[in-house]
Image: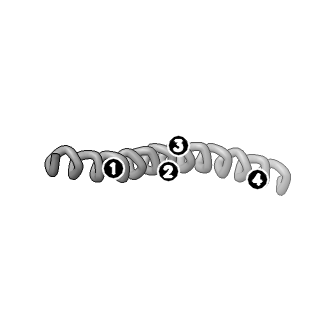
Amino acid sequence: MNKILSDYFNKQVQKRSWIDISLFGCIGIVINLKKIAIPFNLSLSEG
């Protein structure tokens, strides 16, 4: 019984972590794009 529960729990954790990783990946990409885009926009407006 315990093994079934722990297997189930591990599968849920793995699913969760994949979702979390992909979410954090998307957020990280957006933040990096903003970091790149903001100085770029500033230099365009100054130039």
Residue type beneath disc 2:
Phe
Q: Nearer the viewer, mark 4 or mark 1?
A: 1
Give the crowd class for mark 4: few <14, some 14-19, many >=20 residues within 10 Å: few
Q: Amino acid at mark 3?
A: Ser
Residue drawn at (52%, 43%), measured in percent from left and top? 22
Mark 1 lies on residue: 34
Compare residues 22 and 31 and report the one nearer the observer: 31
Label whose residue precedes the other's in the sequence (4 or 3):
4
First along the sequence among labels 1 and 2: 2
* Location of mark 4 (residue): 5
Mark linked to residue 22: 3
CA gap between label 3 and label 1 equals 18 Å
Earlier-in-chain disc, 3 versus 1: 3
Position in image of residue 41 (x %, y %): 22, 47
User: Which callout, 4 or 1, points at the residue further toward the start of the chain?
Assistant: 4
Q: Residues at badges 2 and 3 in contact (C-beta under 8 Å)? A: yes
Classify mark 1: residues with Cα within 10 Å, few (<14), some (14-19) or many (20+).
Answer: few
Residue 31 drawn at (x, y percent)? 39, 52
